[in-house]
Image: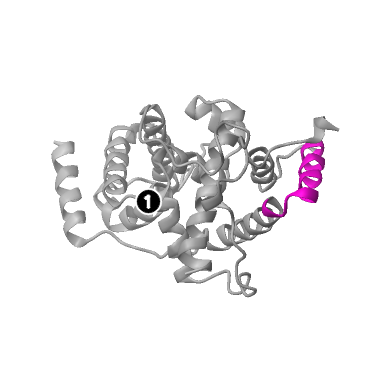
Amino acid sequence: MSKFKITCDEATTICDKSQYGKATLLEIIKLRFHFIKCKVCSLYTKQNTLMTRILKKNKNGHTLCSMSQEDKELMQKKMEEFKS
Amino acid sequence: MENVSNHTLNPDKWIELHADYLYNYTIVRVNKTEVSKDLVQETFFAGLKAMKNFEGKASERTWLIAILKRKIIDYYRKINSNKGKAEVRMNFYNDGENEGDWLEERVPQTWGSDADKNLESEELGNTINDCIGKLPEKYAVVFKMKTIQDFETEEICKELDITASNLWVIIHRARTQLRKCMEDNWFIK
């Protein structure tokens, strides 16, 4: 049974891997086993999964920003210098 | 018959047409305005230098983005090679009989019952970006490549010259820190 015993550090690492679909079956079993005695990691997993959803949803929703006119003019000047 | 290519390059219009687009593309991945501007500038320079290699198969913008992508990866690699920068606060006991257990002050707290409502808003997006910005640079790079740019594990390992287990430790540290930051700044204010 000791093979299945993992620390919270290891459990949360497995949880993080599983957010990218990269945890192995054995790791998932170890994680589930860990949950029986550890409510904290169970909570972490729940919140981590929510974080994944938030990250996905807001990935493309980044506020659009543009460069200032000044920056662009400076850039244009450097381009001219570069060309000559 | 000759293959006619429709795309041409017109460097005089690059800044007007593409600067903002390239800048936005960069800032999402780099999070630093000054660095982003520099990378866009370097991309234009590299574009000028490589103009004769342009085959017209892709649009001007696609071609510039391809150059920019390389520039961003080069920047990531540079950060990754800066060794020995500020050590990170850990979330777990490092040694002793509690090794691997949660540090008391880092234990996740219960979030409000409406935590999973409204997962998409400008404010939430900004908060999470701020939290990513607070990660140590080295962690932020790996985390962003994996989570935002959806790189494969093998690709990141190759580009940054790290092992897969190394990568997962970094992702793990980034995510535990990010969770804590979101707890403090969003879920339990």
The answer to whether B102 appears left or right of A79 in the picture is right
Identify the residue at image location x=60%, y=67%: B111
Reading the image, the residue beneath label 1 is B31
Spot occupied by residue B95 in the image (x, y as percentages of width and height): 56, 31
The region drawn magenta spans: A25-40
Identify the residue at image location x=40%, y=51%: B133
Identify the residue at image location x=35%, y=28%: B82
The answer to whether A4 appears left or right of B11 in the picture is right
The answer to whether A15 appears left or right of A57 in the picture is right
Q: Quadrant of residue B64?
A: top left
Spot occupied by residue B104 in the image (x, y as percentages of width and height): 55, 50
* Chain letter for mark 1: B
Identify the residue at image location x=47%, y=62%: B184
Magenta stretch secondary structure, dominant:
helix
Towards the viewer: B15 or B70: B70
- Name the residue furthest front: B97
Q: Is residue B149 above or below residue A24?
A: below
Q: Amino acid at mark 1?
A: Asn
Q: Secondary structure at mark 1?
A: loop
Q: Give the quarter of the figure containing the N terminus of chain B.
A: top right
Towards the viewer: B89 or B143: B89
Q: Is residue A68 above or below residue A84?
A: below
